[in-house]
Amino acid sequence: MKNILTLVALILCVSKGFTQESKFGLTAGYLNLNVSSYHGGFEISENASGFYAGILGDFKLSEAFHLEPAAIYGYAKDLNVLFIPIHGKYYIGQSGFNVLAGPQATMILDEINPWVKRIGWDLSLGAGYDVTDEIFLQVRYALEISDRHNEEIISADGINGGINSLFAGIGYKF
């Protein structure tokens, strides 16, 4: 946890020095988690709906390209999760529409079974629209690319699992 927060702080500090314009903001909205596990062709999958809220930085690197790191708390069906995405955001012309992509760390904050890893790595893709200079809408999907199965506890071939997440919300930049 300390390593992830240190990484986010470092990115925010370094990005601040290279950007033309920096804004910070808040974001919140609907969260859907799909928790799945696979073993020998058998799949267990469960959806859980909830909410998310967090802080973000928007660092303008050029007119069309921004860097957007964030720290987001999510809650769905008794599961507390911390999401740390680092998105590259590309604006399409002067329309306010943008697409974003980048890595995301996902950390389960609750006590969990020892055969499940707390931290996973995702690939996050999405789209957004800046309603005004301060208010924005955003939808994104994060696909977990790491395996949550802890090989140190259980050594069995063919077991893997992960958490995919869907975010739909609104934000405000200061």
Image (tube, helix red, strand yellow):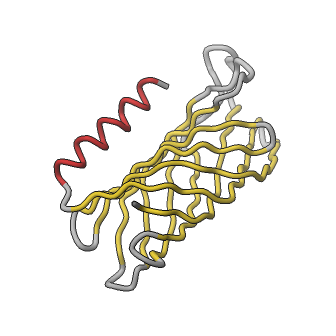
> What's the residue at 57%, 65% (across, down)?
170
Q: Nearer the viewer, residue 80 or 163?
A: 80
Residue 67 in picture, x, y percent from top left: 33, 57
- Vertical position of residue 157 compared to residue 44: above or below: above
Residue in the picture at 38% in, 38% down: 8
Q: Quadrant of residue 110?
A: top right
Q: Quadrant of residue 166?
A: bottom right
> Looking at the rendering, in which quadrant would you find the C terminus?
bottom left
Q: Is residue 16 left or right of residue 1?
A: left
Residue 136, given in percent of the width and then of the height, sits at 49, 70
Residue nearest the viewer, comparing 1 with 164:
1
Place of residue 173 in the rendered image (x, y in percent of width and height, measured from the top left): 42, 62
- Of residue 14 and residue 45, the one placed in the foreground of this image is 14
Residue at 52 percent of width and 46 percent of height? 122
The reply, left or right, for residue 54 in relation to residue 90 is right
Q: How many marks?
A: 0
Q: Residue furthest front?
A: 174
Residue in the image at 60% along x and 35% along y: 147
Compared with 81, 127 (above or below) is: below
Q: Is residue 98 above or below residue 159?
A: below
